[in-house]
Every structure is written in C-alpha cells, then in structure tokens.
Amino acid sequence: MADSKKFITRIILLMVVAVILTLWLVSLALAKRDAIIYPSNIFIGGVSVAGLNHNEAGDLLAQRLPASYGRQLLLQLPSKQLYIPLNQVGIAYDIPATLTKVDVSLNQKGIGVFQHSITRGNIHRVEPEIKWNRTLMEEKLSVLKATYDQPAINARILYSNDYLEYIGHKVGYTISIAASLDEIDNSLQKGLLGPISLITKDIHPRIKLEDIKEVKDMLGISTIRTNLPHTDLNPLIQALNGYIIMPAEHFSLAQVMNPKQIKSNNSSLTLVNSALYQAISQAGLELTDNQLSCTNNLQHPILINAVIDGNNIIIKIFGCQTEAGKEIMIITEKEEIPPQVQIKVVKKLSPQERVIVQEGQSGFTSRNYRIVKINGKETERTILSEEHTPGRDTIIAVGPGTIKK
C-alpha cells in the first residue's frame, strides 16, 4: 500500500515537472520570437503591431499613430476646452523610445521568462512616448493667457426710472504659465494628450453683490445748468455714472478718466466736478484737496448716478440712510403759463369778421426741488434748477371797425 502511494506521488511530480518544463520551453521560444516579432496582444496607442518586427512596427506607428492617438493637445480652462495642433507646440511621437519601452516590457528577467506564456492572451496596451518643445509650449501659453484670461467683473447697480437694479459680480481668473507647464509635462510623460487642466489663479472683484445690497437710499443730489456741447460732457458722465465707492476708499473724478480726456475737457471737467462734489457733500462724505477728491467715511458703499437731462447735469448719490426716518427725494413741479391774445386789424377783412391767424400754446416753468423729509414731514425744500419753456400767443385778425375804443 505504501509503495503504491509513493508510486502515485512520483507520477504526479513528474507530470508537474513536465508541465513547468513545457511552459518554460514555450516561454523561451516565445521570448525568442517576440525579440524579433511582436505578439498579437500588443497595442501601442491603439495601433496593433502584431506580427511585425521592430522596423516594421516603427513604420506603421509613424503612419497610423497620429490618427489613432491624436493630432491635437487638449487643454482645459474653467469654462472652455482648447484644441492645440501638436506641431504648434513642438509635440511629436517618439517612436524609437516607445518601441524600446515595449521591448523592455517583453524581456523582463527572472520569473518574467514565463510572462510570454502566462499573459499571452491578455491585451497589453502601451501609451506612446512623447517629446515636446518647452519653449514653444511656453510661447503658446503666453498667447492663450493674453486671449483667455478673464478679468473679474464687479457687482453693479443700474438706476433707471427711480428703480435700482442689482447686477451680480463674477470671479475672474488668470493662467499661471509656470504651473501649467509643469502640469503639461506630467501628462506628456505619461503619454497623455489631455484633457490637461491649465492651472489658473482666481481674480476676485473689488465689489461683490453682498457688499452693495444695502445701497437703496438717496443721500445727495445736485443739478447744474450747462451750455457746453454734450459731446464734451458725455465721456465724463459715462465714466462717472454707476461708479461705486467702497467704505474707506478715496475717489476723484480724475481717476476714472484717462489723461487725454482730462486735458481736452478742462471746462467740462470743472463743471461736472462741481456738481459731483455738491452731491457728495450732501451725502456726508469727507472732502479733501480743495474739494477735488473725497473719502468714503461712511460704513456702506455709495453709488454715483450721473445723467444729462436737457441742459442740466444731474448727479445723484445713493447709499444707506442711517438717520432714522430721514428721506431725501427729488420732485419736479410744472407751472403752466397761459397764452396771451393779440388782436390785429386787417383792412382786407370786412367789419365784424374775425380770423384766427395763430393758435395759442401755453408755456411752462419747470422746477426741480430737493426735498428732505423726517418721519414723513417735509423739513427742507431746495430748488435745484428752473427751466422756462416759452409758449406762443393767440393771434386774431379782425376787420376795420371791429375794435371799439
């Protein structure tokens, strides 16, 4: 019985040795073949090199790799993808280095001699080696930075028809070239063409929506009549209108104008500046430099609204009214001036005949007032502007003898 067990054990050992020897011999044979001909399970960048020798595989990869693996570098911005042709940034497939990587993988030492038998049926995918020109890539990133950097957008307040509309802010970003180059380098070393996220740095706006939510009350208003051309005044008014001064910030009209505008619009600048600082003074801001600049010494932001209405420059200051029950407003009152009647004697007309030569039209006097109320009771009324619109008299022609003395 014991001899029988020993015999069976010897048979099993011989069979195991035979299998191992067979695998070893087959693996050696395959390894020798794979040193010359690539096996069927090798795919480089999606291209099969089955049955090809080293040179044939190189030629095939040069022909098919761009179409299979990609001709463009894919870069990712926060809100946009950019496709960059490889030749623009000096990127090329390093086919010799790629095949060397495959050859090393197929000729591992030690237990690796069995690798050709064990993994013969498994697909072996290889990422291609990539070479690139760092200088060209840096130049391209500089161009992309100039094109795609996004400035921060401040929150705004639009004033129209006595209504304030609040527009939210937007965070911007700028591309970091050095950090992006490192990120691209890491991806290309792994044989990856993207998407590669460009490294950006956030740019935060000066004014955020939550900063201006308390701006809703009129704090000051001024009106100045002008005969200057609107073409001279408009650049100043447009630059000033909608500007927000944050707490503790310094402000002057000059800082929102470019130097050329300041020199070419000296009269306009003086006029607008005068209207601006009348309104700012009413709002309680601290005036400096002979009223040519100011500091927002209030606890909340203020909004400057500037318009040209007819021949009047109107500046309004909005902010947060901290005095309980106080309200500032502007009202317009119109006074009608009825037309006069002129009687003219015309000899061509018969006695008692009357003809209306001209229909009369009323004139108007329009006055703008700054009204201050405390708890609903008017405590101050200041006239800001007065404008007369002339009417015309009614002219009636009559015949001789109609008018009795």
Image (cartoon, rainbow, N blue to C red):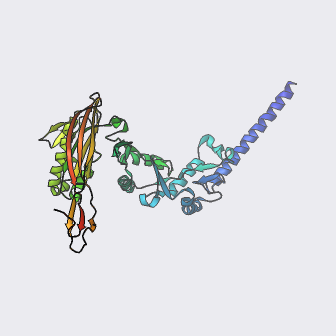
Question: Residue 184 placed where, x, y %?
Answer: 44, 49
Frontmost residue, 74 versus 116: 74
Question: Residue 384 placed where, x, y %?
Answer: 20, 44
User: Does residue 244 appear anywhere in the picture?
Assistant: no
Quadrant location, the C terminus: bottom left
* Residue at figure coordinates x 64%, y 44% from the top left: 113
* Residue at figure coordinates x 15%, y 50% from the top left: 270
Q: Is 150 on the left or on the right of 22, as rendered?
A: left
Quadrant location, the N terminus: top right
| Residue farthest toward the right in the current orientation of the protein | 1
Q: Give residue 265's quadrant in the image.
A: bottom left
* Residue at figure coordinates x 54%, y 60% from the top left: 66
| Residue farthest toward the top in the current orientation of the protein | 2
**From what the image shows, is residue 315 above or below residue 83?**
above
Frontmost residue, 107 versus 50: 50
Frontmost residue, 214 versus 366: 366
Question: Residue 103 placed where, x, y %?
Answer: 57, 51
Q: Is 270 on the left or on the right of 321, as rendered?
A: left
* Residue at figure coordinates x 32%, y 40% from the top left: 207
| Residue farthest toward the bottom in the current orientation of the protein | 348
Q: How many marks?
A: 0
**From what the image shows, is residue 211 above or below residue 354?**
above
User: Does residue 347 appear anywhere in the picture?
Assistant: yes
Question: Residue 180 placed where, x, y %?
Answer: 40, 47
Q: Is 99 on the left or on the right of 162, as rendered?
A: right
**From what the image shows, is residue 130 above or below residue 12?**
below
